[in-house]
Amino acid sequence: MALLNDLAKKKEGLVNGHRLCPGCTHSVIMRQALAAADTDKYDIVIAAATGCFEVSTGLYPYTSWNVPWIHSAFENAASTIAGVEAMYKVWKKKGKTNKDIRFIAVASDGGTYDIGLQALSGAIERGHQFLYICNDNNAYQNTGNQRSSATPFGASTTTSPNGTIIQGKTQPKKDIMSVLEGHHMQYIAQASPSNWRDLMDKVKKALDVNGPTYINVIEPCTTGWGFPAHKAIEIAQLAVDTCVWPLYEVVEGKVVINYKPKNKLPVEEYLKPQKRFAHLFKKGNEHLIEEYQKQVDKHWEWLLKREESGISY
Amino acid sequence: MGKKVALTGNEAAAHAIRQINPDVVAAFPITPSTPIPQNIAQYIADGKMDTELVTVESEHSAMSACIGAAAGGGRVMTATSANGYALMWEMLYIASGARLPIVMAVAARALSGPLNIHGDHSDIMGGRDSGWIELVAENSQEAYDNLIQAVKIAENKDVMTPALGAFDGFNISHSIEIWEMEDDDKVREFVGEYEPLFPLLKTEEPVTHGAWAPPDWYFEHRMSQLKGLLNAKDVVVNVGKEFGKAFGREYGIYEAYKMDDADYVIVAMGSVCGTTKDVVDSLRDNGVKAGLLKLRLFRPFPYKELADVLSGAKAIAVLDRVSPAGAQGGPLFNEIRSALYDANNRPPVINYSYGLGGRDTQPVHINSVYDTLKKIVETGKVEKQFDCLNLRGAWG
Ligand SMILES: Cc1ncc(C[n+]2csc(CCOP(=O)(O)OP(=O)(O)O)c2C)c(N)n1
Ligand code: SF4
Ligand SMILES: [Mg+2]
């Protein structure tokens, strides 16, 4: 891993002047990812799905992108990059380029867990070379914080609101990592911008795979989740330290947990600073926090057991 | 020298694509166009073309991958029908908005529901405002010729607009006809090399494709896109002439069949024109001044040219292979009628729906249309502005 000093001097692929909310981590994650890319060795081309990140960085007549970038629609970042990658194969074959180009598709949870899942699954199965990064901010933020299948249990969103008889989302979050594991990719991982070295390592590894790879990244959203703009990285860290967002890799089917908190914090620590969970702390709703904790523990223990078993494909 | 072959319309389209040998094809099977990606896959497997075939998991992804590939920088083609075309819908607008000259073969078919896999124009008429150039073929020969020309039309620098070459599902796609297949190298020479504008893969000059446009820019984008589409009209004519020089079959935006002195005129597109020509011939043998205006270019709609060639008629029937779906008539009818509004002579225009979901249209039905036109001229009265051909029971 390069020294911070060197990283700071690296030409940025995503530049300032974009219109994300102050404190948004979409840009933080992408800058970490692009800093990790070994751009002395290869170039990067990006396809983005519709969503906060796309609308904030590609607004005609401006662009925040210093690398080739394409947006076409919401549900098709994977099939769009698949097309670009197919054309790259032709360029190589016909001698139109001798460059090493690697491909990234970026989307949030809506464009990944939900409407884009089919295109993602198809592109992975076909074996295109691309790293798919999902910046999971737990809801459709661009359209105003509607629930997605990535919205966690109990969270209040504009379509799973807290009310007098229903307290936020009643279903647990989809385990997208397991869904993607079923595709038997060489490499998939979960990361957080709070643990940036870990995130960068993962991006670098993924980009070195000659095939599809996937990284699920927690993307704290100040506006939708309801926390002060300067707290995003802290929130991400709390997600990691409570094991709400375990940092792990699945390498050829083998689980490797990259970080085991010495002192696993109770989920309240993560939930408390976020307005979307405020109702869980009202008198009478204690069971909801218990349920939340139960879901997190169950998943964490399952991961630990899988790691311990050492089983791979 | 080209050679005469007896093959289906789908095979004609597949051979055209093989000879064009595009950089990328991304496609998904659907009846009746399925044989096209199948044949392409076989040609690639047999080393007869070296296209990169992306066997996507849906038509939405087919058009998305086409867009990615075309923006990547190269020549891109696909094929589809009906529900597949409908699933592409969102991406059709994005392809044309991005000014990517993708070329698509459409074996035109009915849209569900009820589910029906047979020929009509519901798909291409449904997408007529998606910003694509639409060429419609009468037979396998034209299906083949149109696809080859479509590449040159779409990629013209003044056009840079995606184009589809449609031919009727089953009537053409699955019928064996004799047509002329040109030499591979001649076709390749005709379409030439394509130099993509702003390719993503030219990483030393990074470009942003698909930025969104706010209210102070969207309008300008759409109007500049429209100019490209409208420019296609002249380019279609020029490419049609070039094609004539190269291969001996010249094309325009329409074919005027026995129109010079025609009193009773049918306007139609697609395979029904073959039947109609036969009927026109026998009516002419009996001294009836019947004519057919076969439209080849539906988008951009050549309204001036059509008004000129039609305003001499005494009565006109427009055949639409779709339901009017609540409009005054079918889309071809409405556009033809509108085109004639500014003409000095405005003949009465009536409309028929025909052939929906593969319903047969025979000479007897076409004859009934000419009979009705004659009656309109004789009585000066239009009894039914809209009617159906070969529908169980009477309409209306
Ligand atoms: C087919 C389609 N349906 C709906 C939308 C409206 N839409 C745009 S962005 C978006 C939500 C994006 O959510 P996500 O992918 O999670 O990205 P985020 O904004 O949260 O980063 C929606 C619903 C759309 N653009 N296209
Ligand atoms: S709404 Fe959330 S995800 Fe969207 S730009 Fe703002 S902070 Fe970022
Ligand atoms: Mg989201």
Image (spheres, rainbow, N blue to C red):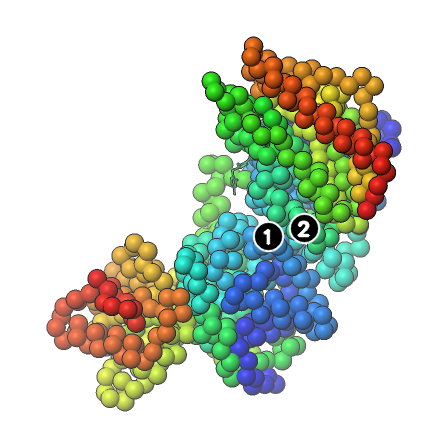
- Compared across the picture, whether B333 is left or right of A157 comes to left
User: Which numbered dot is residue B306?
Assistant: none
Q: Quadrant of residue A39?
A: top right
Q: Nearer the viewer, residue A143 or A308?
A: A308
Ligand 1 within 8 angstroms of badge 1 C-beta: no
Mark 2 vs 1: CB contact within 8 A? yes
Q: Quadrant of ligand 1?
A: top right
Residue A205 horizontal/vertical position (percent): 82, 40
Q: Which residue is mark 2?
A: A123
Residue B300 horizontal/vertical position (percent): 42, 60
- Compared across the picture, whether B307 is left or right of A214 comes to left
User: Which numbered dot is residue B61?
Assistant: 1
- Same subunit under labels 2 and 1? no
Q: Amino acid at mark 2?
A: Ala
User: Is residue A220 among what the camera can see?
Assistant: yes
Q: Is the residue marked by circle 2 packed among few (<14), some (14-19), or many (20+) residues within 10 Å?
A: many
Secondary structure beneath label 1: helix
- Residue at 30% across, 72% down: B390
Identity of the residue furthest to the left in this view: B379
Q: Chain of mark 1?
A: B
Q: CA distance from mark 2 to mark 1?
A: 9 Å
Q: Quadrant of residue A62?
A: top right
Residue A169 horizontal/vertical position (percent): 55, 26
Q: Nearer the viewer, residue B48 or A112?
A: A112
- Residue A275 against residue A121 in the figure, above or below: above
- Residue at 32% across, 80% down: B363
Q: Amino acid at mark 1?
A: Ser
